[in-house]
Image: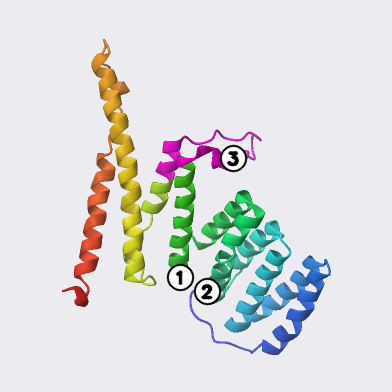
Amino acid sequence: MSEQPKKQEKDYTPEVDAVLPEATSLAKSGKLQEGLEKLLALEKQTRNGADAKSTTRLLSAVATLCYEAKDFTLLNSNLTVLSKKHGQLKESVKVMVELAMGWLDDVRAKQGEPTWLELVETLQTITEGKIFLETPRARLTLILAKFHERISQDPSSAPPPKPDPATGKAPPKPTPFESLQKASDLMSELQVETYSSMERKEKTEFILEQMRLLVLVAKEKDKEAKASKEKAAVSLTGDKKVLAADGEAEWIKVRVGGRKVHEGFISQKDNE
């Protein structure tokens, strides 16, 4: 990924204008790979020449042709590869990621949840650790958190677990609490209060969602801890190993979240 903006060496607009209809025609005639190869060959030139506009058009075209062909294996592969190209332009990757995010609802409705989940996870991997993609990553994380929370409420709706490549065996399905904990953990990893690219209103909504999930987890842990203590009380041994941890850690995080919301509110001049 290019760290410092490189001065544009050439405007490839004429070349891109010429190759796009050609690649599209090949893809629509069943020659998707040939069409992609033409785009990718030119993309290397536009990227090395620091032509951001042309590179963005080509990355978007590659993703769009895969999407329109309903070849989601190729879509995920190209999204990943293009985002990792040496000297890749940040703005081009951002536009490509946001384009693919715009397809998520349609993919989920028409291709099914397993295909949708693979695309979400691909985009999550691409955005990981990239400050310029922190807001798209946060939004993807929220989507995944809602997915896991739904599974906690309706375990039968979970897609089949992927088999382990090494053993060929699928892991057991998570328990409802494990799915809820996963949703909470995903959201708690986000430090949205530090995101310069996110509006205050959206930051607040994320923090409130973090708090809501933490409260749900804390209540479940408190319930389990109470049952565990009652079990220990009636046991002859009083073995403390059976005692479950309560939700104290989550309640502390909820209070921290509340302070973040409060401090964010009073820091705005309009609210003074």
Q: Is residue 156 visible?
A: yes
Which residue lies under the disc numbered 1? 132
Which label was assigned to residue 202? none
Which residue lies under the disc numbered 2? 90
Q: Are marks 3 and 1 in contact (CB under 8 Å)?
A: no
Q: Are marks 1 and 2 in contact (CB under 8 Å)?
A: yes
Measured in 3D between alpha carbons, the distance from the residue under mark 3 to the one under mark 2, in whole angstroms, is: 34 Å
Q: Is residue 51 visible?
A: no
Q: Is residue 234 left or right of residue 154?
A: left
Residue 237 vs 179, above or below: the answer is above
Q: Nearer the viewer, mark 3 or mark 1?
A: 3
**Picture coordinates of residue 101, whole percent (x, y):** 55, 65
Measured in 3D between alpha carbons, the distance from the residue under mark 1 to the one under mark 2, in whole angstroms, is: 7 Å
Principal secondary structure, stretch drawn in magenta: loop
Residue 5 vs 234, above or below: the answer is below
Magenta residue span: 153-182
Residue name at image x 26 percent, y 12 percent: 237
Q: Nearer the viewer, residue 14 or 146?
A: 146
Binning the other alpha carbons within 10 Å of mark 2 as few (below 14), some (14 to 19) or many (20 upward) gives many
Question: What colouring method underlies this structural image?
Answer: rainbow
Residue 234 vs 158, above or below: the answer is above
SS at circle 2: helix
Counting residues from the N terminus, which is met first, the one under dot 3 or under dot 2? 2
> Dividing the image into 4 quarters, which one contains the N terminus?
bottom right
